Amino acid sequence: MYAQLEQMMAAVKKEAVNLESMKVKIKEMEEIKAKMPEIKRKLKEAEDNNLLLQKSLKESESVLT
């Protein structure tokens, strides 16, 4: 009986460690999720700047030819 109780306690402790690990991973995912709007905004800004640079390059090339 005592051995079974020890086995059950070990299983509960192992499960508690696994749950704590899951909590950490969920917290990390929430932090990443919170950063996504800023990352998307910066990406759009970079894409817009890239388009402006491409347009400027084409205009420069047309002046040179």
Image: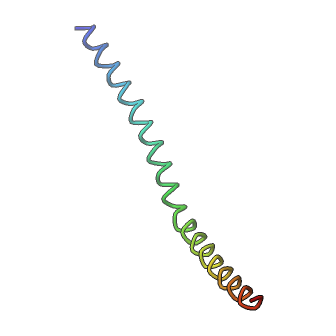
Q: Return the x and y of residue 49 as percentages of the image width and height.
A: 65, 78
Of residue 13 and residue 29, the one placed in the foreground of this image is: 29
The mark total stands at 0
**Coloring basis for residues:** rainbow
- The residue depicted at 27 percent of the width and 8 percent of the height is 3
Residue 16's spot in the image, x, y percent? 38, 30
Quarter-wise, where is residue 41 in the image? bottom right
| Residue at 57 percent of width and 67 percent of height | 38
Identify the image quadrant of residue 50: bottom right
The residue lying toward the viewer, choosing from 54 and 32, is 54
Rendering coords of residue 45 (x, y %):
61, 75
Q: Quadrant of residue 12?
A: top left
Quarter of the picture containing the C terminus is bottom right
User: Which residue sits at x=30%, y=14%?
Assistant: 7
Q: Residue furthest left?
A: 1
In the image as oriented, which residue stretches furthest toward the front? 65
Q: Is residue 50 left or right of residue 9?
A: right
Which of the two residues, 53 or 37, is positioned nearer the viewer here?
Answer: 53
Q: Nearer the viewer, residue 55 or 14?
A: 55
Query: Which residue is at the far bottom?
Result: 63
* Horizontal and vertical percent position of residue 17: 42, 30
Relative to 35, is 52 on the left or the right? right
When the figure is inspected, residue 2 is found, relative to residue 46, above or below; the finding is above
The image shows residue 43, relative to residue 3, as above or below, that is below
> Where 38 sits versus 53, above or below?
above
Residue occupying image coordinates x 35% and y 18%: 10
Question: In the image, is residue 1 above or below residue 12?
Answer: above
Which image quarter holds the N terminus? top left
